[in-house]
Amino acid sequence: MKIIICGKGGAGKSAVAVMLSRSLAKKGAVYLLDADESNRRLAYMLGTETPKTLINYIGGRKEFSAKKDQIGNIKLGELPDEYLGRSSDGVFLISVGKIEQFGEGCACAFGALARILLQHLFLNPNEYVIVDAEAGIEHLGRGIEAGIDVVVSVVDPTMESVTLARFVSDETARLGKHHLVVLNKTTPELETRMKSILKTEGLSVACVIPPDPVIFESSLGGGVFQAHVAQTRVDALAESILHI
């Protein structure tokens, strides 16, 4: 199964991606695919070494066009160690590509690489790929959802977040993909109101994650990501996803 985690900036995509990865790692092999060229902290959140990028594995941007046909032959579990991080809880981290310096150009090659890889990637029943997307809806424009089974929109208590989730829902429905909404950073007082707002947009909520002080402390400290109540909620979400 291939799952993409998306939403507006600051909604908590990476946190949900890490928690869902940990939940599914109890069921089989999990590959967390870092498809956000701006995120510099995902390896730290997992407590693993920062892996070299897939774009460099195939020779860099200049070699990408010439080697597109070879991307479908990439087997995630057979990548060299330097391209495959592994956390203590069994999650494998793979990075598509990163902006490394001023003036190097746009991230279009990274998106194209992720799209081709996901479309051609063969997974066994007990293997899972979770894609941590960049903020916004660039992933839709790049066509990454073509190779995805389940799309998860992370929504925080803002209308901007709701609007993006509605757009993603409409587009994924057109593609025939499953779409789930995770309501994040939401107090009990806000939960009823947010569910009502989402309902008017034709969206139901698959998981509600309240503010978790454990997440706040671990995020501010910059070390391995930790969660308490939030992880319990995402464990239940993982069970729901497995029954789709």
Image (cartoon, helix red, strand yellow):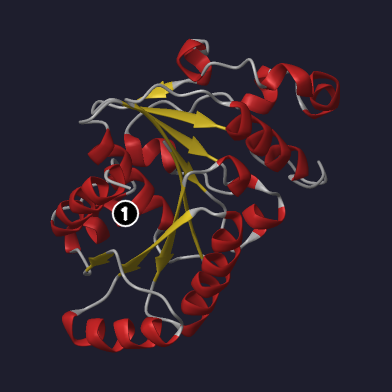
Amino acid found under the numbered disc labelled 1? Ser
Where residue 238 appears, as percent x and y from the top left, is 26, 47
Asked where in the image residue 24 lies, by quadrant, the reply is top left
Please report the residue visible at 60 percent of the width from the left and 61 percent of the height from the top: 174
Q: From the image, tell me which residue sits under label 1.
A: 219
Up-down: is 220 above or below 183? above
- 174 relative to 122 in the view: left or right: right
Count of labels shown?
A: 1
Asked where in the image residue 198 lies, by quadrant, the reply is bottom left
Quarter of the figure with the N terminus: top left
Up-down: is 20 above or below 87? below
Up-down: is 230 above or below 18? below
Return the residue nearer the eye: 119 or 99.
119
- 175 relative to 227 in the view: left or right: right
Where residue 132 appears, as percent x and y from the top left, is 48, 46
Up-down: is 92 above or below 179? above
Q: Secondary structure at mark 1?
A: helix
Where residue 166 appears, as percent x and y from the top left, is 52, 74
- 88 relative to 160 in the view: left or right: left
Return the residue nearer the eye: 209 or 169.
169
- 199 relative to 234 in the view: left or right: right
Asked where in the image residue 111 lies, by quadrant, the reply is top right
Residue 93 appears anywhere in the view: yes
Please report the residue visible at 53 percent of the width from the left and 43 percent of the height from the top: 148
Residue 97 appears anywhere in the view: no
Where residue 47 appears, as percent x and y from the top left, is 32, 33
Return the residue nearer the eye: 164 or 217.
164
Give neighbour class at mark 1: few <14, some 14-19, many 20+ (Cα, 10 Å). some
Please report the residue visible at 57 percent of the width from the left and 42 percent of the height from the top: 35
Please report the residue visible at 43 percent of the width from the left and 82 percent of the height from the top: 158
